[in-house]
Amino acid sequence: MGYRLRMTLAFAILSVASVALLTLLFLHSSYREFKADRIASVERMTACLAGNIYWDMQADDPRRVDEALARFARGLPAPVPPVVVVLDEGAEIFASTEGGLAGDDRGAWALGSSLALIAGLLDTPEQGTRTLESAAGFISAARVERDGLHLGAVLVDYPLSSLDRHFITLYQTAIGWSLLLLPLLLGLGWLLGKQLVRPIERLRHCMQRVGEGDLEIDCRGIRSHDEIGALARGFEEMLAGLREKRMLEKEMQHSERLVAVGQVAAGVAHEINNPLGGMLNAISTFKRHGTDPRVAEKTLDLLERGLRQIQSTVSALLVQARVESHPLTPADLQDLHTLISAEVRKKGIRLEWQCSLERRVPLPSSAVRQVMMNLLLNAIQATPDGGRVLMTCAAQAGHLLVRIEDDGPGIDPEDVQRLFQPFYSGTGGHGLGLWVTYQTISQLAGSIEVGPRAQDQNPPGTRVEVRLPYLREEANRADRQPAVRPAPALQPREDSA
């Protein structure tokens, strides 16, 4: 149920209750006033009747008194004529408007306790009219006396039914006016509810549009000075803050895009610079020994492999399908050893190469060499001067095992899961090399484990172990993410080819 409908219903219920209460109060007050006015009128008429029948009672003429009582009863404003009784000095009925009450049957009628009470009041020396109210109506009594001579009393029993008839008429009139007033009040309540709910509806519409992402909506139409106006002003301030926040976010996103572009460019340069270094070394060697046909052939082979390595790097950065290349051979590993030797000599560390692959394996040579090169470069960068890097690779049943260990400070366990995220680097690099490695291993449906070396070694160092399953039919080349998990510490061991 909407707030507007609830407000209208509440106003309608309040209006009905108010009209009903006011009607009841009006009827009650009107009934009391009417009853008091009727009692006063009957008391005056009763006193007047007592004075008029004095001479007839003194002449002991009940017939003339009965006629006077009949005229009096007909003159009272009542649909049902009241009972009028005249008592003599002995409290016996002298005359009445009821014929059966006179003569020998006088003693057969009595007004009960009310009559006895009125008779007792008339025995008092005080003059005037007395009235006794009862559940059936009221009884007015006046003494018949003149110049101190007391002859009896007049009793007028006025029935309550006469008052009820007037009250019913008054009630019907009040209900009629109430029914005419209620539609006006309900219509006024509907208009008032609409007017009161209008700013709330406007504010709700603005909040809904803002919730849908529209921060350019104009919500300044609410200018009241009540609680709704204060709420609207607070919402406008919040909306201004959201607009400012969105503008700052756009500026930050633009800045982050520029930074990301720069990082990607730097990462691409870093990844391509590695094979370029080896290619430059090969060209330098060719310049010195270019007359030897074997050197020239080897140089051209290294240049070709370096260019293919660059092509594979670009493909991995674009997260495309891996570039097809020839199966991995021992010569590819020897070329990798030659390319990485320059970095090893530059860093002043010792490289232990335990890769004795004797036959080709069904794995793309470019991708495998890229994985090995990235892992070796990270290990060389993490190893201090004079340290050692151990490279082990072996062709096992169904997969190629590559294990690289270094004498570096190691990697915290909580950093292992972030190690292969883009732009994350724990060694001060650009953070793309290991991400490219991870993507390449993903394309090859392999797995990689990172952890410390043997627990009794100092420094703890880092051990990286990669398993690359051999390629089979195209349907078996699953494109799934490798599991990255810390590996248990193992003693270094040498694997035979």
Image (cartoon, grey):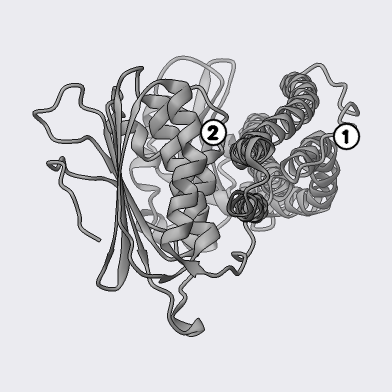
User: How far from the left and from the top, in percent, is residue 166?
Assistant: 69, 50
User: How far from the left and from the top, in percent, is residue 82?
Assistant: 60, 51
- Identify which residue, 423 or 232, lies in the foreground: 423
The quadrant of the rendering that contains the C terminus is bottom left
Label at residue 216: 1
Residue designated by label 2: 431
- Left or right of 359 on screen, residue 149: right
- Location of residue 301 (image quadrant): bottom right
**Quick one: label 2 or label 1, which is nearer the N terminus?**
1
User: How far from the left and from the top, in percent, is residue 202?
Assistant: 83, 38
Q: Identify which residue is drawn at 91% across, 29% down.
A: 221
Tell whether label 1 touches label 2 (CB within 8 Å).
no
Q: Amino acid at mark 2?
A: Gly
- Location of residue 99 (image quadrant): bottom right
Q: Identify which residue is drawn at 48% across, 14% down.
A: 126
- Identify which residue, 324 or 175, lies in the foreground: 324
Q: Amino acid at mark 1?
A: Glu
User: How far from the left and from the top, in percent, is residue 312?
Assistant: 62, 55
- Identify which residue, 396 or 294, lies in the foreground: 294
